[in-house]
Image (cartoon, helix red, strand yellow):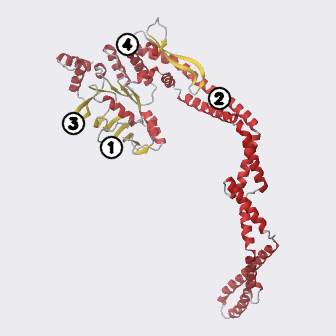
């Protein structure tokens, strides 16, 4: 439930704080006072896109804050928990800051993308704007309304995904077929590049090995002489280090007769002797290996040069030449088997088309199952709203498969029992269209997700007893959910549980809108104004009291 709406620096609104409660709330005021701005602000708070010029003159940004009381474990509560945006209580605060060129959105003080705010908004509020009845003339709107009533969102999503997969397969197949003209040239280039790399036959890890061998062979003389000198110093020279250590051990053993603790030192020296002997043997092996290694330095440097040359030519690091070679061969092989690829894609396309048709049939079944109930429910509401013996029906006409299904959806109306059904756009007048729209909204309110319904002057074009019926119907809706309605009709306004009045006045040379919650006596005056216009007399006040007290 929407508990409070705060609007700052928005159009002609300086600052408004509007408390709201459960039940049926009505908003009235003179034409141009700014009533519809409240709905616009509420729409922005739940994710609608902002247009230029919404920020009040002289302000840097407009601010809209909507506070909601959410149902525990309801759809909105579950969504908030899934996105780690829930608070400890059952309150949810959404906030929108709108500047001249950008806007920011927040859910419970956490910045979020606009799409995320819109997702939550769909679970909190259903907005029915004052011009929404005009969209009823569009086929896509009629289709969406039928699907909403049928609860066909899962089938529509599954079909959209299946058709997207089908189109992706079609695009791949078309691309392969269109590339036939370039295939020969590409195959020739690949063959040349593969043969060029084949002459080198680069292997994984070879580049690093070549560089290591080149460095070793380039410094072979320095390495050889250095190893010989080290071996002499350690084990083979005139005065090798290992001999000096042996002498030290012998002297230490003489001293150990007088000091047993020197045994520790003896162990260390013996270990050092063993290590130095092993080092000498290792150096000897390495030096011997260098002598037997083929010293073909020019050949290695020539191969390194070829690696460098091909790496520059193909614009890849040298160590990636083996991977490039493998990739080129894979692509070349794929071109060789392109006919097989085309055949496989054609088979995949047939399977995807079959799967999409199956999903479309599921959606069609949902629509056909819901159509009689929707037609009957809207017909009943139309007749309650003063459209006489008018009838409503939904036509489902088979069409080629698209992401929207295999049939066109069209709303039909019959003005009388003996009149044929005809398309809504060709039958309904403006006032009738408004009432049909309201009938649809009333019927769909039973299946909508949001716990709050907002109606912005959807009662335009009606009056008298029909207007009173509209008010009663909205009040009935408010028994199960919160309803907010902007209206010019006293018959509707009198049905409200809470009455909000929008004023417009000059303040410091600027036109400003304000809102107040009317007390019982003030409601009488406002209903009387709506009944009698400028001249309010005792008769209109008495009539207003009668309307308010039923």
Quarter of the image with the N terminus is top left
Mark 1 or 4 closer to N-term? 1
Q: Nearer the viewer, mark 3 or mark 2?
A: 3
Mark 3 or 2 closer to N-term? 2
Quarter of the image with the C terminus is top left
Q: Nearer the viewer, mark 1 or mark 2?
A: 1
State if disc 3 and disc 1 touch (CB < 8 Å): no
Mark 4 or 2 closer to N-term? 2
In this rendering, is residue 240 above or below 126? below
Q: Nearer the viewer, mark 4 or mark 3?
A: 3
491 sits to left or right of 181? left
Which residue matches tag 1?
60
State if disc 2 and disc 4 touch (CB < 8 Å): no
State if disc 2 and disc 1 touch (CB < 8 Å): no
The secondary element bearing badge 4 is classed as loop
Q: For marks 3 and 2, give the CA distance.
A: 65 Å
Rendered location of residue 403, percent (x, y) = 57, 28
Q: Which residue occupies the foreground of this view, 360 or 201?
A: 201
Rendered location of residue 102, percent (x, y) = 40, 42
* Other residues around mark 4 within 10 Å, as few (<14) / some (14–19) / many (≥20): some
Which residue matches tag 4?
386
Q: For marks 1 and 4, give the CA distance.
A: 48 Å
Rendered location of residue 372, percent (x, y) = 51, 16
The secondary element bearing badge 1 is classed as loop
Which residue matches tag 3?
507
Residue 1 seen in this snapshot: no
- In the picture, residue 528 is in which quadrant? top left
Which residue matches tag 2?
355
């Amino acid at each position: 439930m929407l508990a409070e709406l705060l609007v700052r620096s928005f159009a002609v609104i300086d600052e408004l704080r509007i408390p709201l409660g459960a039940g049926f709330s009505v908003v009235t005021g003179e034409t141009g006072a700014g009533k519809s701005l409240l709905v616009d602000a509420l729409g922005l708070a739940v994710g609608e896109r902002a247009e230029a010029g919404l920020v009040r003159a002289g302000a840097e940004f407009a601010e809209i804050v909507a506070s909601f009381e959410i149902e525990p474990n309801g759809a909105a509560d579950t969504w908030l928990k899934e996105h780690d945006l829930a608070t400890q209580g059952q309150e949810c605060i959404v906030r929108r800051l709108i500047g001249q060129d950008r806007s920011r959105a927040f859910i419970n003080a956490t910045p979020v993308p606009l799409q995320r705010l819109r997702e939550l908004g769909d679970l909190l509020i259903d907005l029915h704007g004052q011009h929404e009845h005009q969209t009823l003339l569009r086929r896509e709107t009629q289709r969406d309304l039928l699907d909403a009533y049928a609860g066909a969102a899962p089938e529509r999503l599954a079909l959209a995904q299946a058709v997207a997969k089908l189109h992706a397969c079609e695009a791949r197949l078309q691309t392969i077929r269109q590339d036939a003209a370039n295939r020969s040239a590409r195959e020739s280039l690949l063959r040349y590049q593969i043969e060029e790399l084949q002459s080198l036959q680069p292997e994984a890890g070879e580049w690093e090995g070549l560089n290591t061998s080149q460095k070793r062979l380039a410094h072979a003389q320095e390495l050889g002489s250095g190893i010989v000198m080290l071996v002499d110093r350690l084990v083979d020279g005139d005065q090798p280090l290992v001999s000096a250590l042996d002498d030290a051990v012998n002297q230490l053993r003489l001293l150990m007769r007088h000091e047993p603790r020197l045994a520790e030192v003896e162990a260390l020296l013996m270990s050092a002797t063993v290590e130095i002997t092993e080092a000498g043997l290792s150096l000897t092996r390495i030096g011997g290996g260098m002598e037997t290694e083929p010293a073909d330095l020019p050949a290695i440097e020539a191969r390194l040069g070829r690696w460098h040359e091909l790496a520059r030519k193909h614009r890849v690091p040298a160590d990636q030449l083996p991977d490039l070679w493998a990739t080129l061969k894979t692509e070349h092989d794929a071109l060789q088997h392109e006919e097989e690829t085309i055949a496989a894609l054609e088979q995949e396309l047939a399977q995807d088309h079959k799967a999409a048709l199956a999903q479309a049939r599921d959606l069609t079944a949902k629509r056909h199952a819901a159509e009689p109930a929707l037609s009957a429910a809207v017909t009943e509401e139309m007749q309650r709203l003063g459209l006489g013996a008018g009838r409503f029906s939904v036509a489902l006409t088979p069409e080629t498969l698209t992401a929207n299904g295999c049939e066109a959806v069209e709303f039909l109306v019959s003005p009388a029992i003996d009149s044929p059904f005809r398309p809504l756009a060709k039958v309904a007048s403006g006032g009738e269209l408004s009432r049909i729209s309201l009938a649809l909204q009333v019927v769909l309110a039973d299946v909508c997700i949001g716990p709050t319904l907002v109606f912005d002057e959807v009662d335009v074009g009606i009056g008298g007893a029909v207007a009173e019926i509209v008010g009663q119907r909205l009040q009935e809706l408010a028994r199960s959910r919160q309803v907010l309605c902007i209206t010019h009709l006293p018959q509707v306004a009198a049905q409200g549980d809470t009455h909000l009045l929008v004023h417009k006045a000059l303040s410091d040379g600027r036109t400003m809108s304000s809102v107040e919650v009317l007390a019982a006596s003030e409601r009488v005056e406002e209903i009387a104004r709506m009944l009698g216009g400028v001249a309010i007399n005792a008769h209109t006040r008495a009539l207003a009291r009668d309307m308010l007290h039923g």
